[in-house]
Image: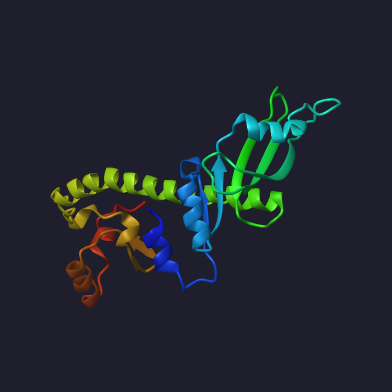
Amino acid sequence: MLLEPVVARYRGTVKRLYFRGEAAFANPEMYKFLEADGVGYTIRLPANNILQNRIAYLLKRPVGRPPHEVRRYYASFHYQAQSWNKPRRVVAKVEWHPGELYPRVGFIVTNLARPAERVVAFYNQRGTCEQYIKEGKNAIKLTRAVMPHLRRQRRASPAPPLAYKPRQLHADAGDAEVGGALVADQPAREADQDRREGRQPRALRDVPDG
């Protein structure tokens, strides 16, 4: 049995185990195994004529104008298939959707004693787990697609650093204030010499009067 190692791993560590499964798990051996180990289960059951006849009163179109919202109905009964060793509880859900001619019908076999609506809600929670699994698979695919591109970038040689050219700085990046006038890009050696000799900065001396 596929679930045996999983059940053995958690046996004794939690108060009770629960199992949700699609119709692929709907077989007598699965039911017997889960019941023997005290595992609560909800498993989708394929529809057949006998099951549909049991809820025939819910399959009739509701009287009155079609509603604008979904109408849901639940049923609970005991059913025994030919391959089963005993009757088991079956929960049915019937949904009438606006604009649809026939209802959507689903059956669940379970050993839970909860109300039918809560059994269906518990079973539907499996969709959250499936969504997490799908998101994990998508993340793995994305990582596999991006990693080769990142490796190519790492192998590529880095771009050479920009060379510094002293007289190509923007004026406001290296301006010095002298007597209230801005001197753009004056070499430091010439400025120091003018200051020691008390002369006007050379950049200003070269500017014609007026």
Identity of the residue furthest to the right in this view: 64
> In the image as oriented, which residue stretches furthest toward the bottom?
196
Residue closest to the eye, 43 or 117: 43
> Which residue sits at x=67%, y=41%?
92
Q: Nearer the viewer, residue 148 or 117?
A: 117
Q: Is residue 160 above or below residue 71?
A: below
Would you say 117 lies left or right of 175 here? right
Q: From the viewer's perspective, tell me whether residue 99 is left or right of residue 153.
A: right
- Residue at 72 percent across and 43 percent down: it is 75
Q: Report which quarter residue 165 is drawn in.
A: bottom left
At 71% across and 35% down in the image, what residue appears? 54
The x, y position of residue 31, in whole percent, is: 51, 51
Q: Is residue 190 visible?
A: yes
Say whether residue 96 is visible. no
Q: Which residue sits at x=73%, y=28%?
A: 98
Quarter where residue 193 is shown = bottom left
Which colouring convention does the figure follow?
rainbow
Picture coordinates of residue 143 (x, y %)? 31, 48
Q: Position of residue 82 (x, y in %)?
A: 55, 39
Res. 45 image quadrant: top right
| Number of on-image labels | 0
Horizontal side of 146 relative to 112 (left or right) equals left
Image position, residue 71 (x, y; %):
75, 36
Question: From the viewer's perspective, is residue 34 above or below residue 134?
Answer: below
Residue 176 vertical position relative to residue 143 in the rendered view, above or below:
below
Of 24 and 164, the residue lying toward us: 24
